[in-house]
């Protein structure tokens, strides 16, 4: 499988805002905004590392195999829009599939559905009879698509994409689940409050936290518990 990021997130990979973090910290002061943003960046990266896949919305170009079924599966989810789809990596001679040829069957799972199915390209070996060579599937299907979560809406336009078509709709609001953002905010608050040095307690506004030392270092955090249902295991 070949996966290329065509357009990276323009939101700095942040999964929340400094104003939301200040709400968690119960303060209105913006005097430490730079460090709060840094804590959010670290927490956002932590969440994506913990889950094992990117969360922020990006555009991908991916080659994938098919197995003769009605479903084609891409690796980045949730699918927000399919921009282009070809039956070959050579776009100059490949057949381009328009938005009426297929549909997003399950955006969260990354499934594209086609009534005619997707041709299986496994190798065939001949002995006493013909048989499929295990794990020999070629990856001719080339898909350009937008996937991931965003705090704001997205816009996607191409010759094969329509906001009224079957390949998804342009969202005018957030797509990031609120519980994922809450986990990021909890982690960011923890990173912000435990600044360099041997800090045993910290107070910001009405919020006061006391740390119990290293004995609880291996204890699973509330942020990890919140993210656990979204985690993927290889």
Image (cartoon, grey):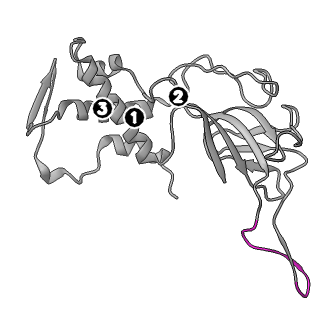
Residue at image location 62% in from the left, 42% down from the top: 4
Tag 3 near tag 1, CB within 8 Å: yes
Q: Position of residue 65 (x, y in %)?
A: 75, 55
Q: Which mark is residue 9?
A: 2
Q: Secondary structure at mark 3?
A: helix
Q: CA distance from mark 1 to mark 2?
A: 13 Å
Residue at image location 17% in from the left, 35% down from the top: 194
Q: Residues within 10 Å of mark 1 (few under 14, many from 20)?
A: many
Give the residue number, with chain letter if any, for mark 3.
188
Residue at image location 51% in from the left, 36% down from the top: 55
Give the residue number, with chain letter if any, for mark 1.
44
Q: Position of residue 28 (x, y in %)?
A: 24, 11
Q: Position of residue 50 (x, y in %)?
A: 41, 47
Where 121 sits versus 28, above or below?
below
Magenta residues, start to end: 127-136
Q: CA distance from mark 3 to mark 1?
A: 8 Å
Prevailing secondary structure class for the magenta stretch in the rendered image: loop
Q: Earlier in the sequence, mark 3 or mark 1?
A: 1
Q: Secondary structure at mark 2?
A: loop
């Amino acid at each position: 499988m070949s996966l290329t990021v065509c357009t990276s997130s323009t939101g700095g990979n942040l999964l929340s805002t400094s104003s939301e973090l200040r709400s968690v910290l119960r303060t209105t002061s913006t005097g430490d905004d730079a460090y709060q943003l840094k804590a959010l960046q670290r927490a956002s990266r932590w969440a994506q590392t913990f889950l094992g896949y990117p969360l922020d919305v990006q555009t991908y170009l991916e080659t994938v195999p098919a197995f003769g079924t009605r479903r084609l599966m891409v690796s980045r989810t949730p699918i927000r829009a399919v921009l282009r789809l070809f039956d070959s990596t050579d776009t100059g001679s490949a057949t381009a599939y328009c938005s009426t040829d297929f549909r997003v069957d399950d955006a969260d799972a990354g499934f594209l559905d086609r009534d005619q199915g997707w041709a299986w390209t496994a190798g065939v070996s001949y002995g006493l009879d013909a048989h499929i060579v295990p794990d020999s599937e070629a990856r001719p299907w080339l898909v350009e698509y937008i996937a991931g979560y965003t705090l704001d809406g997205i816009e996607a336009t191409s010759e094969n994409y329509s906001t009224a078509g079957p390949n998804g709709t342009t969202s005018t609001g957030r797509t990031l689940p609120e519980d994922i953002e809450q986990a990021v905010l909890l982690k960011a608050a923890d990173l912000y409050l435990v600044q360099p040095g041997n800090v045993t307690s910290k107070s910001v506004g009405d919020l006061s936290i006391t740390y119990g030392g290293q004995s609880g270092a291996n204890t699973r955090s509330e942020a990890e518990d919140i993210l656990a249902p979204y985690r993927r295991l290889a």
